[in-house]
Image: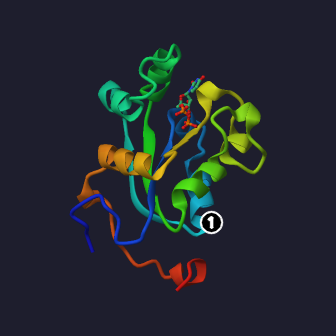
Amino acid sequence: RRNTSTAPPAAAERTLIAVKPDGVQRGLVGKIIQRFEQRGFKLVGIKMLQVSKDLLSEHYCELRAKPFYPDVQAYMTSGPVIAMVWEGDNVVQTSRSMVGPTDPTQAQSGTIRGDFSIHVSRNVVHASDSLEGAQREIQLWFEGKDLLDWDCCSRAWTHRP
Ligand code: UDP
């Protein structure tokens, strides 16, 4: 079944997760996907892309004026990114806790950033930080036709029926 809009089916929550260029170059894509699968979330969209300066500046519209933004731009446009949309109960907040804090020096082992990174400028992964942010970012990165509304056979074992 295909959706024509980027809005999730009623009551389903979605978030944007992106493996940044360092995560792709370091061969961490599979490990990062596995964490979301094993937690019980459902993948509804995935693509590899070279991020443009325009997309990045829309995505990080609140960071454009920061002194570190030129470095973020160089980093995020330096190689391919894997962008994904994951769906499930409370996925926005749970993903943030799975990813860990922005600065990996503050990130606990067991989080993605705590296990795979050591510096804020190379922190491996992006996760939307709010419901509104997730909706905005999903619309920015994906077309509705590329988000699949499919029945995952393990859903009844991970969600309240
Ligand atoms: N960033 C950086 N230096 C900083 C703060 C942020 O390089 O001092 C980068 C880092 O890659 C971070 C991204 O900018 O993930 C976006 O920052 P934000 O505050 O939105 O953190 P996030 O939502 O990614 O945890």
Q: Nearer the viewer, residue 103 or 29?
A: 103
Give the image quarter of residue 26.
top right
Q: Position of residue 3 (x, y in %)?
A: 25, 67
Percent x, y for residue 131? 45, 53
Please report the residue visible at 38 percent of the width from the left and 45 percent of the height from the top: 137
Q: State whether residue 120 is above or below residue 43.
A: above
Residue 123: x %, y % from top left = 61, 34
Crowd tier of the residue under label 1, counting other residues whose Cα lies within 10 Å: few below 14, some 14–19, many 20 or above: few
Find the residue positioned furthest to the right: 109
Residue 49 lies left or right of residue 76; in this view the side is left
Classify residue 29 as left or right of residue 139: right
Q: What residue lies at 52% left-to-right and 55% top-to-bottom?
A: 92
**Image position of 133 with respect to 5: above or below:** above
Examine the rendered structure and indicate whether residue 81 appears above or below residue 118.
Answer: below
- Position of residue 38 measured from the top left corner of the image (x, y, whole percent): 62, 66
- Quick one: 24 or 154, which is closer to the camera? 154
Identify the residue shown where x is 63% and y is 35%.
Answer: 102
Quadrant where ligand 1 appears: top right
Q: Quadrant of residue 58?
A: top left
* Residue 50 appears left or right of 112: left
Quick one: which residue is furthest to the top in this view?
A: 67
- Secondary structure beneath label 1: helix
**Is residue 80 rendered to the left or right of residue 6?**
right
Q: How is the image coloured?
A: rainbow
Q: Is mark 1 within 8 Å of ligand 1?
A: no
Query: Dividing the image into 4 quarters, which one contains the N terminus?
Result: bottom left
How many numbered markers are drawn? 1
Three-letter code, disc 1? Arg
Which residue position holds label 1?
A: 39
